[in-house]
Amino acid sequence: MTSHNPREHAKQLRDLAREFEALHARVRDISYTPGTDALHQISPLLLKAQDLTATTLIRLRALDSSAYTSVPGSRASLECLASVVLAASLAGNNLASALSANPYEGAPFPGYPADDAAVRTARHPEAIPQMTGHLANAAHQLDLSATGCHYVASGITRDLAATREAPATARPTTGPALTGAQFDALKSLAHGGGRLYESIQRGLGVTRVATDDGTRISIATFRALAKRGLVDRDTSTSLFRGQKITVTDEGHRALAKPHPQAPATAPAKAAPKPPTVQGARR
């Protein structure tokens, strides 16, 4: 059944990411002997990869049919999820390639001498490097798949939150004056430019700002500028690649004002002199 709740899509994608992570661990830690044992060990991994590929495709079709497509930034999420379909398919292809490189032990055509144990054993050193390479590639693609699912889930949550804040950012800015840090950040973005990036750490999306001139801008400062409509970002690009940050007309008008100065420290008042107490006359 297709869910129409974008938050439910995010939850399903996080669950899918955990399944990719579990399969990645199985492929990475696989132990096998070339031949029949390898067939028995790798076959379930291939079937699971194919199942996860089908599930990812179902999630992509459901998300593409949901109301989320009207949310700014949703296209990047759909493109990323489509890349997960590709990565999962490549993982299955690599597992199938490992099975193809596996040395099997069936009987030869009539008229050919049967392989003895020494001949069969000699084929293993030739097959093992190929199989190891295919399994390593499969593990890499599964890791990318898990990361992509986490990213899309975080993107859905982030885009929905940004949509709720959109009416506030569309209004003319009338808030308090910029702080010195906010003014410097805005000036850096106006002159040198910058990008907004997101990476996945321990399953969570971590967002950061990178400027061309090396100015350090905290994500809190960027969000404060964005909330007041002073900066904007290109949501048509994936946060993994970096979304270009631009300064709006309102932001340039804010830069035309004098730089906020730290409040002057009032001079310390001289301590009042104690009252003079005159001794009583006799």
Image (tube, rainbow, N blue to C red):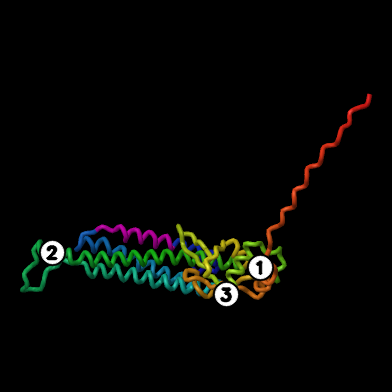
The residue beneath circle 3 is 70
- Looking at the image, residue 108 sits to the left or right of residue 200; the answer is left
Circle nearer the N terminus (2, 3): 3
Callout 3 environment at 10 Å: few (<14), some (14 to 19), or many (20+)? Answer: few
* Image quadrant where residue 108 sits: bottom left
**x and y percentages locating residue 256 in the rendered image:** 68, 72
**Of marks 2 and 3, the one in the foreground:** 2
**Main SS of residues in magenta:** helix
Circle nearer the N terminus (2, 1): 2
Looking at the picture, which amino acid does disc 2 mark? Ala
Looking at the picture, which amino acid does disc 1 mark? Arg
Distance between mark 2 and mark 1 Cα atoms: 70 Å
The residue beneath circle 1 is 228
Task: Say whether residue 166 is magenta.
Answer: no
* Image quadrant where residue 164 sits: bottom right
Distance between mark 3 and mark 1 Cα atoms: 23 Å
**Of marks 3 and 1, the one in the foreground:** 1
Q: Nearer the viewer, residue 74 or 224?
A: 224
**x and y percentages locating residue 138 in the rendered image:** 32, 66
The residue beneath circle 2 is 122
Region of the chain picked out in magenta, as a range: 16-31
Circle nearer the N terminus (3, 1): 3
For the residues bearing labels 2 and 3, Cβ distance under 8 angstroms: no
Question: Residue at position x 50%, y 61% from top?
Answer: 206
**Of marks 2 and 1, the one in the foreground:** 1
* The label number, if any, that marks residue 38 in the structure image: none
Element at label 1: loop
